[in-house]
Amino acid sequence: MRRGVRTTIALLVCVPLVVAAGIQANRSGNVHGARTGLTLLVPAAPGGGWDTVAREMQSVMRERGIVTNPRVVNAGGAAGTIGLGQLMEMSGQDDVLMVTGTVMIGGIEVNDSAYRLEETTPIAHLADDYEALVVPADSPYATVDDFVEAFEKNPGQVSIGGGSIGGTDHLTAGLLAEEVGVDPADVNYIPFAGGGEAVNALLSHSVAAGMSGYNEFADQIEAGKLRILALSAPEPVADIDAPTFIEAGYDLYLPNFRGVVAPPGIAPEDAAELQAIVEETVATPEWSDAVERNKWVANLQTGEEFGDFLDGEIGRIQDVVKELGL
């Protein structure tokens, strides 16, 4: 058994009682389904990107009366696979939505998880966030071309800091390597526990560049301490002054998608009701404000369309993980 599997199982033994207690507390008195007591399961610790999505949804649902008592329950660990395991144990439960995204797909592969995202019930793709390649403001790399020139010559000497192994940051670095003819396994990728650590490493010149979601670097970019070289979006993003990799001539596009899925085994009419709840939520001005505030790009897909999107992303990311030798 691989170490990742042992770690995941050990964590799953510890977490279920806490998470189940939170969800059962929400179900007590819930006789009318998700409209009166919806649980938003966040497979990460409070404060991160998935947690932000859940709490923005909770706020809109509550303020607009879409759901009477929406609750957020956190079950973090192992790139989201701990929370995914919890969701899979709730088969048939129609009042739970789990926030998910690109990081979980990589985490499933790296941790050799027994649970698969494609076994859940796809509800909605909400929005996309994008990866930013940044360097210290005094870096010799003024453009993405400058960075790539050095990276091609000696990838081992051009360190890239970001989040967990197999996460979106790591995957984007691997895709960039593949695009410019560098073996993804040769990328000198330095993982950090959080965005703050990666920023500190950049500011202290402990790494040559950073790769993470734009919001992780936004404050330091706006303060003039970091320089953004490129964004992994398909087209320019409003209020972000940076070219996309595609605009710069590199065929690299990776959305860090934000979506929600339900447990497996729920009835089609219950899936439709959850989908309707989400559609009502994202149609509000308050949700539009949240998208703008967090510099997400709205990208609503529901049901089967979202399921097809997931299948495509899962296949693509599985290939990248293999190329990275993870």
Image (cartoon, rainbow, N blue to C red):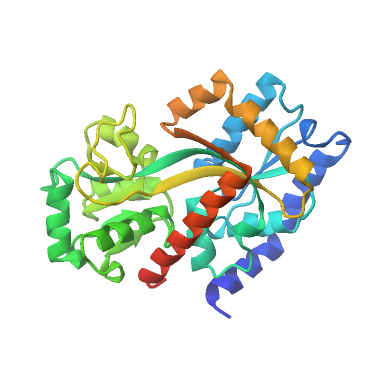
Q: Is residue 60 above or below residue 178?
A: above
Question: In the image, what residue occupies the spot 23% across and 38% down?
Answer: 243
How many labels sit on residues? Answer: 0
Residue 61 point in image, percent of width and height:
67, 26
Of 286 and 135, the residue lying toward us: 286
Q: Is residue 26 left or right of residue 244?
A: right
Find residue 270 and report its image quarter.
Answer: top right
**On the rendered image, what quadrant is the C terminus found in?**
bottom left
Q: Is residue 36 left or right of residue 204?
A: right
Residue 237 point in image, percent of width and height:
33, 32
Question: In the image, what residue occupies the spot 50% across and 59% down?
Answer: 314
Q: Is residue 313 left or right of residue 235?
A: right
Residue 201 visible in the displayed image = no
Q: Is residue 174 left or right of residue 103?
A: left
Of 298 and 64, the residue lying toward us: 298
Residue 228 point in image, percent of width and height:
24, 40
Residue 8 point in image, percent of width and height:
60, 67
**On the rendered image, what quadrant is the N terminus found in?**
bottom right
Find residue 272 and report its image quarter.
Answer: top right
Residue 266 visible in the displayed image = yes
Of 116 and 206, the residue lying toward us: 116
Question: In the image, what residue occupies the spot 58% across and 21% down?
Answer: 284
